[in-house]
Image: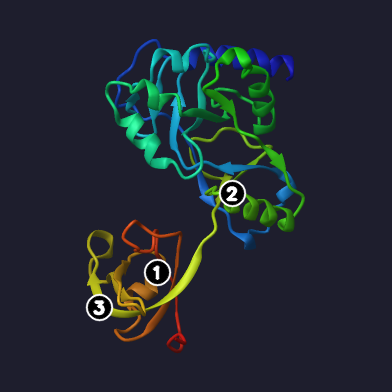
Amino acid sequence: MRASTALAFLVCCVLCTPSSGTADERPPLMLAEIYEHESGIDLSDYWVSEKYDGIRARWDGQRLLTRGGHVIRAPDWFVAGWPNAPLDGELWAGRGRFPVVVSTVRDELPDEAAWRQIRFMVFDLPAHPGPFTERLAALRGMLTDASGPHIQLVSQVKVANRRELDAMLRNVVAAGGEGLMLHRGGSLYHVGRTRDLLKLKPYADAEARVVAHVPGKGKYLGVLGALVVERPDGLRFRLGTGFTDEERRHPPPVGSWVTYSYQGFTAGGVPRFARFMRVRNEPPRE
């Protein structure tokens, strides 16, 4: 790290670490856009890591805060030895164990045994004034064995092209992971949504028949709010996202077939995050 950048970072850590604060302050976080294969970005500019299915959290140097600004009541031993600098990361209990994290974090009185299953997976250093590649190097030097067993730096790698990215995604998903994150190496830490940080998750698609239109509310008043669709097995659910303004004004007619994307299923068998994609010209084959 350059001397000037290092000095600026040390000063920023002192200024950005609050000695007190209200529990309802929303921490300033960098938010990801969705990666689109057709975007034409140079993948060699990005660091790639696994997308963890946990709870986003920010360590402000003294406390863990949720994305909404609520203080997380972690045990003192959990955060013992952590750096006195803001850290951005994910509270994670392992692949496919999101419910464990949710139930643990919600407890006002920490469940000691449950917290021992959780790690804080750190992926950024918000107060550092340099680009992400420099922030990553600083994190590698900061998060040592002395930082404690429950804090861990997220592994970041480089891919040369789309083929390598797709292979990494397949491997992560096959192992039970949620997807990938792409972080542009030359980007500063931007608060809010930015294409310098991208998320890539797989999805499946299927067909369903339109059985009803749900009128829109609020900004969609007077146009389509959602479609009620029916799968070939008779299950009905709603599609409320993925439409253009024109499609909301002139929705697919009742009786037509549409294609939707989704990401797995709920416990009741309903497609998760179902999203309208397009109208089919003919019904799907049985």
Q: Is residue 61 visible?
A: no
User: Up-down: is 17 above or below 181?
Assistant: above
Mark 2 → mark 1, Cα distance in angstroms: 33 Å
Q: Which residue is mark 1?
A: 243
Residue 5 horizontal/vertical position (percent): 68, 19
Question: Which circle, 2 or 1, is nearer the viewer?
Answer: 2
Of the pair 161 and 179, the residue shown nearer to us: 179
Residue 230 placement (x, y as % from top left): 32, 76
Q: Which corner quadrant of the image does residue 258 belong to?
A: bottom left
Q: Nearer the viewer, residue 80 or 70?
A: 80
Q: Earlier in the sequence, mark 1 or mark 3?
A: 3
- Residue located beneath label 3 in the image: 212
Which numbered disc flags the more N-terminal residue, 2 or 1?
2
Type of amino acid under label 3: Ala
Residue 53, visible in the rendered structure: yes
Name the residue at 54% across, 14% down.
Answer: 83
219 on left or right of 153: left
Q: Which residue is mark 2?
A: 175
Amino acid type of the residue tagged 1 in the rendering: Phe
Q: Residues within 10 Å of mark 2 (few under 14, many from 20)?
A: few
Q: Name the outermost residue toward the front.
A: 113
Q: Quadrant of the N terminus?
A: top right
Q: Amino acid at mark 2?
A: Ala
Q: CA distance from mark 2 to mark 3?
A: 39 Å
